[in-house]
Amino acid sequence: MNPFNTPIRTLILALGFTGALVSLPAVAIQAEMAQPKATIAAEQPSCTCFDVTVVGEGPAVLLIPGLASSGDVWHSTVEALQADYQLHVFTLAGFGGVAPLSHDVWEVGFLITQQEAILRYIRQQQLNKPVIIGHSLGGYLALALATAAPDSIGGAVNIDGLPALGVLFAQAPASDSTAQDATPASFDPMAIAKGMANNASWHQRIVNDMFRSDGQTSGRVMGELMQADLRPALASIRVPVLTLGALQHGAPYSTPEQVQQNYENQLANAPAQYHSFAFAADSKHFIMADAPEWLNQQIVQFLRSHSVKAE
């Protein structure tokens, strides 16, 4: 198998896009999506952009799940942090049973709309520079806020998210006959779930979130992420950022070394004094499923080392 195809397949799974690929035709996705911007645009009218559950007391931490996921994915992290932190657990519009964005909001774009809405939420709740922790799509949003709004947040943890997913496709040889291996011939939610987590007890949970999510939203957000490229903006990061990568989500098609190299290449522009990596050696994309203790230890260490502590 062409080794170049395997990182692409891995990273589609890593952002939870395989189900989205069958939700809308690729031609429709390309026609509907505008190029997302790396910076926050002028503030748009407010929208019902997410549901939030608040748990615990202390410094504020925002937990943002990925595409076609609900806030339930943060269960173990909430248990680990709630004694010392005020946790704002998000489920984004269109996912996990939350109503999709209204049609008029889509003109602006999902990614920019969510960035603005998160910043508006921080202001309205009078949160003092909360840390943003995001998984997959949520990781992208955490990176975007770290680049565009460093005065509003205290730091970011990017869990298995990428700043420029579409770049991997652009780099793939057009004649690569194995490119179709990146997506299944038919929609098999359980096979997708198994590709994103080793922990069998999580497979049905992932599938349930998929079926509670709006397929059109998943397809359109995937289209935006395929066109987004935060890499140049990463140079403007001025708050602490930690990227946590899962090295097994490409198995058996790509090696952990290939997966790690992809992350290091994509985040090369992030200043070393602000950005660091850690990698879960035995985890697929849902690190909270496969390595919850390791994940929560990394998060706690990040929060403590950057003085985000309970009073």
Image: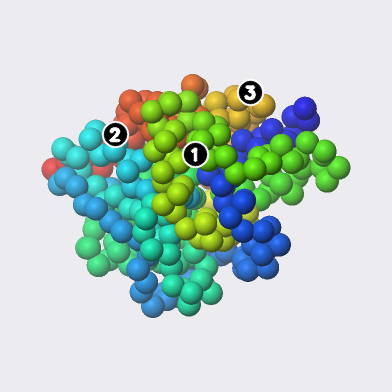
Of the numbered discs 2 and 3, the one sitting upstream in the chain is 2
Tag 1 near tag 2, CB within 8 Å: no
User: What type is the residue that disc 2 sits on?
Assistant: Ser
Residue 275 location in percent, x, y? Answer: 47, 40
Tell me: 276 left or right of 28.
left
Label 3 or label 1, whichever lies nearer to me, is 3
Q: Which amino acid does label 3 sit on?
A: Pro
Mark 3 sits on what residue? 252
Mark with earlier residue (3, 1)? 1
Q: How crowded is mark 3: few (under 14 residues within 10 Å), some or many (20 or more)?
A: few
Please give the name of the residue rendered at 69% of the width and 41% of the height, measured from the top-left corner.
Answer: 185
Residue 257 seen from this side: no
On screen, residue 232 versus residue 92, left or right, reads right
Q: Residue at x 20, y 43 (%)?
A: 85
The answer to whether residue 269 is above or below residue 7 is below
Coordinates of residue 81 in the picture (x, y in percent): 23, 37
